[in-house]
Amino acid sequence: MIVYNINYTEESIEDINNLENYIALEYHAPITAKRYINGLYKKIKSLSSCAGSFRPETRLSIVNRYGINVRRINYKKMAVLYLVHDTEVYVLRVVHGSAISGIF
């Protein structure tokens, strides 16, 4: 079994921080924000054992921006876009699933 190392781009870290701040400040729910972000990180961490099992995305808006090998997993309503290279996983973006075509 392959064990993948998880790497985050600056954009993905910014996406996660913005999401946490949005939940905490906009909804006045800092505890909920922490729980949500912890669940998101747990979902991303699960890629260390299964990153290669998800098929590459075929949406042109995603392929044109990140190439033909970008993959996606979902956590609740969020989409995590990532690339797999050998034993490395690169988390590219974390965006709302309904806005996936608007991230460019």
Image (spheres, helix red, strand yellow):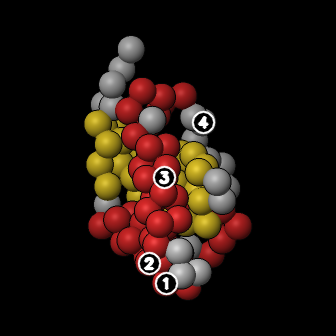
In the image, residue 58 sits, relative to residue 104, either above or below, namely above
Q: CA distance from mark 3 to mark 2?
A: 14 Å
The C terminus lies in which quarter of the figure?
bottom right
Q: Residues within 10 Å of mark 1 (few under 14, many from 20)?
A: few
The residue carrying pointer 4 sits among few (fewer than 14), some (14 to 19) or many (20 or more) residues within 10 Å by Cα, namely few
Q: Which residue, given by chain and number where applicable, does mark 3 sit on?
A: 40
Mark closest to the chain's N terminus, 1 or 4? 1
Residue occupied by mark 4: 55
The alpha-carbon separation of the residues under discs 1 and 2 comes to 6 Å
Report the mark closest to the observer, 1 or 4: 1
Q: Earlier in the sequence, mark 3 or mark 2?
A: 2
User: Which of the two residues, 43 or 69, is positioned nearer the viewer here?
Assistant: 43
State the residue position of label 2.
21
Q: Which residue is mark 1?
A: 25
The CA span between labels 1 and 4 is 36 Å
Name the residue rendered at 51%, 58% in the picture.
36
